[in-house]
Structure formats: C-alpha cells, structure tokens
Amino acid sequence: MPVVCVVGAQWGDEGKGKVVDLYAQYADVVVRYGGGANAGHTLVVGGEKVVLHLVPSGALQPRAQCVIGQGTVLDPKVLLDEIDELERRDLAPERVFVSDRAHVVLPHHKLIDGLREADAGAGAIGTTKRGIGPCYEDKVARRGIRIGDLVDAKTLGERVRANIEAWRPVIAALGGEVPDVDAIVQLYAEYGGRLRPFITDTAKLLWDAMKDGKNVLLEGAQGAMLDVDHGTYPYVTSSTVLAGGACAGAGLGPTAIDRVVGITKAYTTRVGGGPFPTELHGEDGERLRKAGNEFGATTGRPRRCGWLDIPALRFAVQINGMSELAVTKLDILAGLGDISICTHYEGRDGTRYDTPPYDGLEDLTPVYEKLPGWTEDLTKCETIDDLPDNARSYIRRIEELADAKVGMVSVGADRTQTLRLRDPFG
Ligand code: IMP
C-alpha cells in the first residue's frame, strides 16, 4: 500500500506544490491534512501560473481524487472559488471531497486575526490574516463550526450565535465591530448548499482507497519550523504540520505511511516574524530574493532570505521521519559566488547546537562552511549528471550534513525542470 507524505522541511514555501503536482501523476488520491488558506501553492503548468490555497495541488493532474481532510480549517468562499476554477479549466471538480469534520473559518476569525496582529505592533507573529489561529482556537475550545454543520440551517444558526457570543468581549477589547449573526448564518448556509455534493466522510474514503491498494499522496502545508509543537514558538502556525499530523488530519494510522518526502529549498526563506539564524540582510538578502522571486504566494509579502540552515533541516528530517529530501530552486544559487551552508549553531558560551533548541534561537550564532559555487545556468539540465560538479557536491554535502538522501532536485518552476533520482511510489 504505497502511501507517500510530502512535507515542508523549513518555514514553508519550499516548493511542495510543484513536487506534489509531479507525484500526483502516480497518485489515485491526494490529501490536504492541515492548515487552510494560509498555504499558497504556486504551480507553473505550460508557462501558466496557478495558485491553490485549499484544494490539493494534485488537482491540476486530471486523474487523482482530491481530498481535504478533517485536520484542515476551511474558508468556504476560497474553497468554492477554487472549485469554480477547476470547472473553468475543465479539471473535473467532482474529484474534490471535503471532510464533514473539517472546521470552518468564519468572518470574525479573520477579523480577530487582523486586529490582534495590528495590536501586537513590533511583536506581531506576521500571520497571513486568514483567520487560521482563531479557527483552531475554536476547534480546541470545542465550540468550532464544522463543515457538516453548514448543511443544517437550524444547528448552524445556534452554533454560530454561541460562537460569536464567546468572541464578543475579545472583538470589543480589540476595538472591532461584532458581525451580524443572521447575515453570517444566511451566507454560510448558502455556502453549505453549494458544498453539499463535495462533503463526505473522507477518512472512510481513504480507508477504502488504501484497502484497494491505491496510491495515496498526503500533501503537507507550511513547514517543520512553523509546526505548533516543534517550530519557533510562538512564531508558528496553529496546526501540526509534520508527517505525524497527517495521521490525525487525514484519518489514517502511522503504520499506513510508507514514505515521507521532505522538501527544502537550496537556501532558506521565511515570511513573518520570528528567529531566522541564517538570514541575509541588506544587499545579499536582496540578491537572493530577486534571483528566487521570493514573494509570498498568499500575501505577496517579500520573503526573508538566507543560506541553507542545516540544523533546522536536520531537525525536520528527524521529527518527520523523512525517508528522503527533494531540493528545490538549486538553479537560483548560480552566479552568487561561494555558497555558505550553516552546519550548526553556537551559543555565547561556545555550546554547539546541531538542532534548534526550544527557545533562544535568536541568540545563537550560525557557523558556516563555504562551498565553491557555480556560474552555469542549471535550468536546462535534464539529469543529475548534467549538473556542474560544484552543484552536485553541494547536494552531496546536504545529504551528509542533514543525514538524508536527496531523491529529487528542481532547477526551475516548470514541471519539466526536475531531476529525478527515484520514483516516489516505487
Ligand atoms: P498563520 O498560519 O496565518 O497563523 O501564520 C503564522 C505564521 O506562519 C506566520 O509567520 C506566517 O507567515 C506563517 N505561514 C503560514 N502559512 C504559511 C505558508 O504556507 N508558507 C509560509 N509561511 C506560512
């Protein structure tokens, strides 16, 4: 039963969408298991750019069933827009299945997310303001609205009313306006009506698919360093983004997952606040940002850029149980001169850290090793042997330091610009 999980190994934006899109050629089912419209997967197909926030990136392959599991938090309007987009592209939206247990992002979740960020000033998390945090708060507080609730107007009204009452003092304290309950209930009941054909028990769907020996691809969102438990807390998202989260978020057991593929850029980026030991400031960061076109797919924010952070990558390999890595955007490093790679961090007292500690990352100094760069354009390379020696050595060094094999290298945004070292479902 080949079940493959693709996860981000950094702070998100590693290029998971491209890898998932490629693997989806072999998949019968592709599943999103966590997060929401904070994720933005950019795909380039035939020169055309497509950004998906909720529907799994596998949707652009015409065959696979696209499942949105119960670990996600869904903004129904975003979901319906993406379903419409699939329809426009003739990509069979009836392949989309949405868990009845997934949680619903309500308008005041987004409002509160934005107000809190504004209120926090310099201490802001830098969230995507998509209401992700408040929605997960409701889930854990056991007062959330689930997708299944949208199709029952009576319970929907009662639950939304109780939910808004719980948030009323918070909204007032933040200087916001409490939204009109009736208008929300009416609008969300309409969304429910439109979503009804897509809503199902997705864990059962997965179970049946696995029993039939189908190929299942679990598509992670964000990256290990944004994980609510293991990331740079509190500068994290509000869900378990690791491969382990796929079990609860999609509804399968840990023994069902055969392989975990971690995606890492050849360098590092992060959006939002929080520590980033290898960040390059000034002109050096700007050069990388420009070369890699590092602007957020969801919010358009410029991403912070820096050298590859091996301690963070090594940690991601360990806590995800990664079977292999896929390295994206290797082409971007061409012409940047020598390449630095952070092998470990050092504390003020000289203590060595091979993985990030639970706190105080901002006080540690990254220790670098310099590797010779290359000037050749990699975007036309077709196999790993076409890479210049220095680019190949860089990949080998990542493998040694992170203690994981590299199974794929990406040298451009298009599907074709991918050097494969092994078959994901093989
Ligand atoms: P939230 O998930 O919107 O609450 O944002 C919390 C943190 O996670 C912020 O630093 C965001 O920039 C970051 N974040 C959330 N989703 C993504 C993503 O898909 N890519 C990169 N960063 C993300």
Image (tube, rainbow, N blue to C red):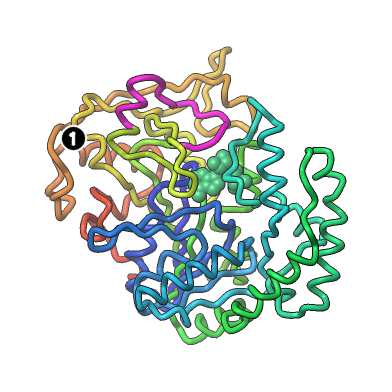
Looking at the image, which is closer to me, 62 or 28? 62
Measured as percent of width and height from the top left, residue 18 is found at 35, 57
Please determine whether, in this image, residue 345 is positioned above or below residue 381: above
Kind of residue at badge 1: Asn
Q: Is residue 243 magenta?
A: no
Res 245 quadrant in image:
bottom right
Q: Residue at x 23, y 58 (%)?
A: 47
Looking at the image, which is closer to me, 377 or 5? 377
Res 253 quadrant in image:
bottom right
Ligand 1 positioned in quadrant: top right
Please determine whether, in this image, residue 178 is positioned above or below residue 122: below
Q: Residue at x 64, y 32 (%)?
A: 124
Q: Is residue 279 magenta?
A: yes
Q: Residue at x 40, y 31 (%)?
A: 305
Write down the residue under mark 1: 390
Res 58 quadrant in image:
bottom left
Q: Which residues are magenta?
A: 270-288
Q: Is residue 227 visible?
A: no
Please determine whether, in this image, residue 339 is positioned above or below residue 193: above
Callout 1: SS: helix
Measured as percent of width and height from the top left, residue 137 is found at 75, 52
Q: Is residue 282 visible?
A: yes
Measured as percent of width and height from the top left, residue 277 is found at 49, 26
* 52 left or right of 341 in image: right
Label 1 Cα neighbours within 10 Å, binned few <14 / some 14-19 / many ≥20:
some
Looking at the image, which is closer to me, 80 or 274? 80
